[in-house]
Image: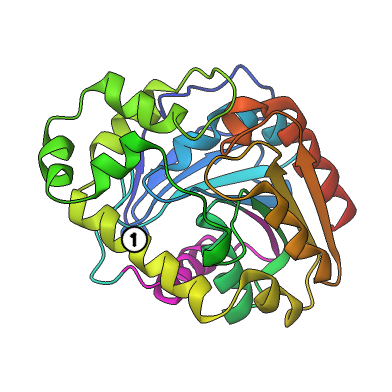
Amino acid sequence: MGIYDGKHPHGMHGMQGMQGMQGMDGMQGMHVVHDGPREAPPLVLIHGSGASGSSWGPVVPALAGRYHVVRIDLPGHGRSAPARSYDVSEQAAGLAAVLDELGLRPVTVAGHSSGGYIATALAEQRPDLVGSLALISSGPSPDALLPQPALLRALLAPPLGPFLWRVRSDAMLRRGVTAVCNRPVDVPDDLVADVRGMGYRTFRTVLRENGAYIAERSVPARLTALDVPVLVVFGAADPRWDPSSAHHYDTVPNARVEQLPGVGHFPMLEAPEPTGELLLRFAATTR
């Protein structure tokens, strides 16, 4: 695994006790960013489809005060290399390999949206690695998906999709993020840059594989088969997944479901303080 030093665009946040951030090319070509003291308990953050570790930026300063925060760009996203397959279980296996190389276990894993599926698959494959699991805006099953905003439909569907993808402006990329938010947000510049780097076919493939994972078996059913503490966070105004579907997780033993009033699909951008507080409280009670 080659390691290179590199500052991340978010900088050091001026926090005491934080290590210098590093990018790493792991076994799977995944880009890794570290925040907070390396000796602290590890908290792994996994982004959703089309995003990157930068999408967690606003909550990182609060988390890194108490945890070794590890953000990983999934294959084909952000600064990570494309993969031959975007199958959820294979992505989870690649993530496990990176965590093994870093010597991190057990970890608290938090996944946003479809990142929650990768986190769940990781817990399915490697219960020795995952001590607790937080899912943020992770739809439980395909029937919970709402009609998507017009801009996202246009960007993804032929015949316009491939053309629009090539001519996307920064403003259009920002609108793509805010289209699933319910509050005004400042989309981080590094997230816009990371989203710009993703290929159209890769994004379509990722969405298809994520859909196949939850169609095969719902996330609550998968979690019920695991013996792991779970936190589920949903925006009560999520325009991507039916907010009431958060209660599908009520059937999961050891699960706590929290809804954030007035928040859409991106709690980390729309409500970073309450989102960070929920994660901190959850990680502290499951250590």
Which of the 4 image quadrants contains residue 274?
A: top right
Which region of the structure is painted magenta? 86-110
Q: Is residue 129 above or below residue 184?
A: below
| Image mark count | 1
Q: Residue furthest right?
A: 285
Which residue is tagged 1?
206
> Which is more toward the observer, 186 or 78?
186
> Which is more toward the observer, 215 or 191?
215
Q: Is residue 137 left or right of residue 170?
A: right
> Which is more toward the observer, 285 or 232?
232
State the image coordinates of residue 246 (x, y, percent, origin top left).
72, 55
For residue 39: magenta? no
> Which is more toward the observer, 52 or 25?
52
> Colour scheme in the image?
rainbow
Estimate how packed mark 1 is, as few (under 14), some (14 to 19) or many (20 or more) residues with alpha carbons within 10 Å: many
Query: In what quadrant of the picture does the N terminus appear?
Result: bottom left
Query: In what quadrant of the picture does the C terminus appear?
Result: bottom right
- What amino acid does circle 1 point to? Val
Secondary structure under badge 1? Answer: helix
Q: Can residue 35 be seen at all in this image of the molecule?
A: yes
State the image coordinates of residue 87 (x, y, percent, origin top left).
37, 73
Q: Can residue 93 be seen at all in this image of the molecule?
A: no
Which of the 4 image quadrants contains residue 63?
A: top right
Instruction: Identify the residue at horizontal 42%, vertical 29% (top origin).
Output: 8
Q: Is residue 151 left or right of residue 257?
A: left
Instruction: Identify the residue at horizontal 69%, vertical 45% (top origin).
Output: 234
For residue 96: magenta? yes
Task: Report the magenta stretch's main SS.
Answer: helix
State the image coordinates of residue 214 (x, y, percent, origin top left).
52, 71
